[in-house]
Amino acid sequence: MKSVFLLFHTHHLPDGEDDNKLLGVYSSREIAEKKIEAEYRKLSGFCEPDGEFIIDEYTIDQDNWEEGFLTTYPKEPED
């Protein structure tokens, strides 16, 4: 096996933020797609129209984040 397939669900919140959930790691895209249809779409919250399923392929033993990161925070309101 050279790749794995991560299945995520993203719920788009009214305030514009997203709530992301990692649902599983599978050996093929086809298995992940079958899990969506056979199980997850039947569960509360996952069947709502304000969400989406995402399947991402990751190569085993390969770096996926090769740069640093910068965290920014919203400015505090001025008095």
Image: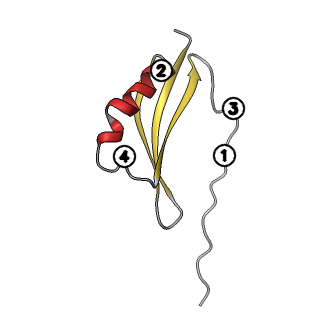
Q: CA distance from mark 4 to mark 2?
A: 19 Å
Q: Which residue is mark 1?
A: 69
Question: Which type of secondary structure does the marked residue at label 2 adopt?
Answer: helix
78 or 46, which is in the foreground?
Answer: 46
Q: Amino acid at mark 3?
A: Glu
Please report whichever mark, 1 or 2, sits nearer to the chain's N-terminal start: 2
Work out whether 39 lies above or below 51: above
Disc number for residue 50: none
Disc number for residue 66: 3
Please report whichever mark, 2 or 3, sits nearer to the chain's N-terminal start: 2
Q: CA distance from mark 3 to mark 4?
A: 32 Å
Badges 4 and 2: C-beta atoms under 8 Å apart? no
| Residue at figure coordinates x 62%, y 73% from the top left | 75
Give the mark toward the camera: 2 or 3: 2
| Residue at figure coordinates x 47%, y 66% from the top left | 14
24 to the left or right of 55: left
Work out whether 50 lies above or below 77: above
Which residue is most to the right? Answer: 67
74 to the left or right of 22: right
Give the mark toward the camera: 1 or 2: 2
Q: Which residue is mark 2?
A: 30
Question: Which type of secondary structure does the marked residue at label 1 adopt?
Answer: loop
